[in-house]
Image (tube, helix red, strand yellow):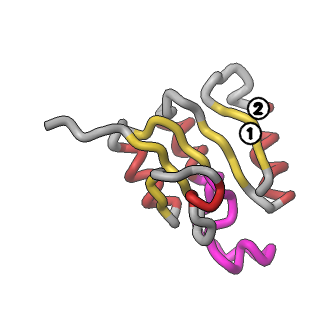
């Protein structure tokens, strides 16, 4: 039996259902997101930048971020067919995403608008 595709929500604290993404698979770490993407069954993804309280407070704690996940996606050419959306309250993280988007993913149809929630 073939397993169904699913939508992926990466965020350490925000529940996807509270942001209009009912039924999405909720993962809280970059490693969990990458493992989900490796299945090849992710239809679309919404990613947060900061994945720990320390990062949310503006400090680098050395833990992986949502940015790490997008870099992995680019390196392995793994893109959900429905696209990738970034949701983040981090203005510095947003700048990193914008540089990434303007740089090596400028021709990609897989990267959607960055939103702030």
From the top left corner, tell me how far across and down residue 80 is, in percent.
Answer: 49, 33
Where in the figure is residue 46, as x and y percent of width and height?
60, 47
Q: Dividing the picture into quarters, in which one does residue 10 lie?
A: bottom right
Q: Quadrant of the C terminus?
A: bottom right
On residue 103, which mark appears?
Answer: 2
Q: Quick check: marks 1 and 2 in contact, CB under 8 Å?
A: yes
Q: Secondary structure at mark 1?
A: helix
| In magenta segment, residue 28 | no
Q: Which mark is residue 100?
A: 1
Tell me which segment is drawn in magenta: 47-68
Q: Could you say which disc has been placed on residue 27 in the image?
A: none
Residue occupying image coordinates x 48% and y 59% = 26
Please say if 80 is above or below 21.
above
* Depth check, front residue: 7 or 20: 20
Residue 22 sits above or below residue 57 on the image = above
Percent of width and height locating residue 25:
44, 54
Q: Is residue 52 highlighted in magenta?
A: yes
Q: Mark 2, residues whose alpha carbon is within 10 Å: few (<14), some, or many (≥20)?
A: few
Q: Secondary structure at mark 2?
A: loop
The residue at the point 75 percent across, 36 percent down is 113
Which of the two residues, 54 or 12, is positioned nearer the viewer here? 12
Q: Main secondary structure of the magenta part?
A: loop
Q: CA distance from mark 1 to mark 2?
A: 5 Å
Q: How many numbered marks appear?
A: 2
Furthest-left residue in this view: 1
Q: Position of residue 58 (x, y in %)?
A: 80, 73
Is 22 placed above or below 4 here? below
Packing grade of label 1 (10 A; few <14, some 14-19, many >=20) is: some
Compared across the picture, whether 46 is left or right of 8 comes to right
* Residue 69 shown left or right of residue 24 in the figure: right
């Amino acid at each position: 039996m073939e397993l169904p595709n699913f939508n992926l929500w990466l965020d350490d604290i925000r529940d996807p259902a509270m942001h209009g993404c009912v039924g999405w698979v909720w993962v809280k770490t970059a490693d969990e997101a990458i493992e989900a993407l490796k299945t090849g069954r992710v239809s679309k993804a919404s990613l947060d930048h900061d994945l720990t309280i320390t990062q949310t407070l503006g400090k680098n704690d050395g833990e992986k971020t949502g940015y790490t996940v997008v870099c992995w996606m680019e390196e392995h050419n793994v893109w959900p067919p429905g696209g990738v959306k970034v949701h983040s309250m981090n203005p510095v993280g947003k700048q990193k995403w914008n540089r990434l988007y303007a740089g090596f993913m400028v021709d990609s149809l897989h990267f959607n608008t960055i939103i702030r929630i």
